[in-house]
């Protein structure tokens, strides 16, 4: 996914499948929205996508990957998890 800076397993997620997090020194999503509203945003910060390694969706992706690393459903699942994190 080109929209994220990194993808990693989360140590804090227990129920959700995924979450987007910003680096400690990065601009918050709220501040980015404010700057964009007033046409002051020059670039957006890429977030890190954290995945819950115990979630059934992530486990299904792992199973698919182990069977066939180029299975196109893996990318579809990844996109879905990213988009759910954006909505959340």
Image (spheres, rainbow, N blue to C red):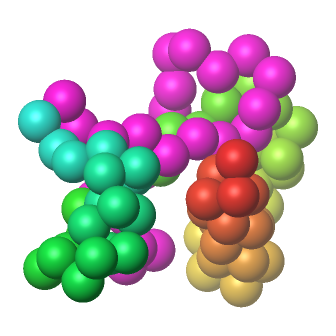
Q: Position of residue 79 (x, y in %)?
A: 65, 72
Comparing 31 with 7, the one in front is: 31
- The quadrant of the image that shows the N terminus is bottom left
Q: In this picture, which residue range is highlighted in magenta?
A: 1-24
Question: Eyeballing the image, is 57 above or below 38?
Answer: above
Which residue occupies 17% across, 44% down?
A: 26
Which residue occupies 75% across, 25% down?
A: 54
In the figure, residue 42 lies in which quadrant? bottom left
Question: Eyeballing the image, is 7 above or below 21?
Answer: below
In the figure, residue 12 lies in which quadrant? top right
Comparing 88 with 49, the one in front is: 88
Q: Position of residue 27 (x, y in %)?
A: 21, 48
Question: Eyeballing the image, is 20 above or below 86?
Answer: above
In the figure, residue 56 lies in which quadrant? top right
Which residue occupies 41% across, 40% down?
A: 21
Q: Is residue 6 among what the camera can see? A: no
Whether residue 21 sits left or right of residue 76 in the image: it is left
Whether residue 37 sits left or right of residue 19 in the image: it is left
Whether residue 34 sits left or right of residue 8 in the image: it is left
Question: Eyeballing the image, is 64 above or below 76?
Answer: above
Comparing 63 with 4, the one in front is: 4
Whether residue 12 sits left or right of residue 1 in the image: it is right
Tell whether position 6 is magenta.
yes
Which residue occupies 35% across, 61% down?
A: 34
Count of picture labels? 0
Q: Is residue 40 among what the camera can see? A: yes
Q: Position of residue 55 (x, y in %)?
A: 80, 32
Q: Position of residue 74 (x, y in %)?
A: 70, 70
Tell whether position 13 is magenta.
yes
Outermost residue to the front: 38
């Amino acid at each position: 996914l080109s929209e994220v800076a990194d993808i990693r397993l989360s140590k804090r997620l227990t129920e959700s499948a995924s979450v987007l997090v910003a680096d400690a020194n990065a601009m918050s999503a709220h501040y980015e929205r404010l700057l964009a509203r007033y046409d002051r945003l020059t670039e957006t910060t890429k977030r890190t996508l954290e995945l819950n390694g115990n979630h059934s969706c992530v486990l299904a992706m792992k199973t698919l990957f182990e069977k066939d690393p180029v299975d196109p459903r893996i990318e579809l699942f990844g996109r879905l998890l990213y988009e759910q994190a954006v909505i959340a």
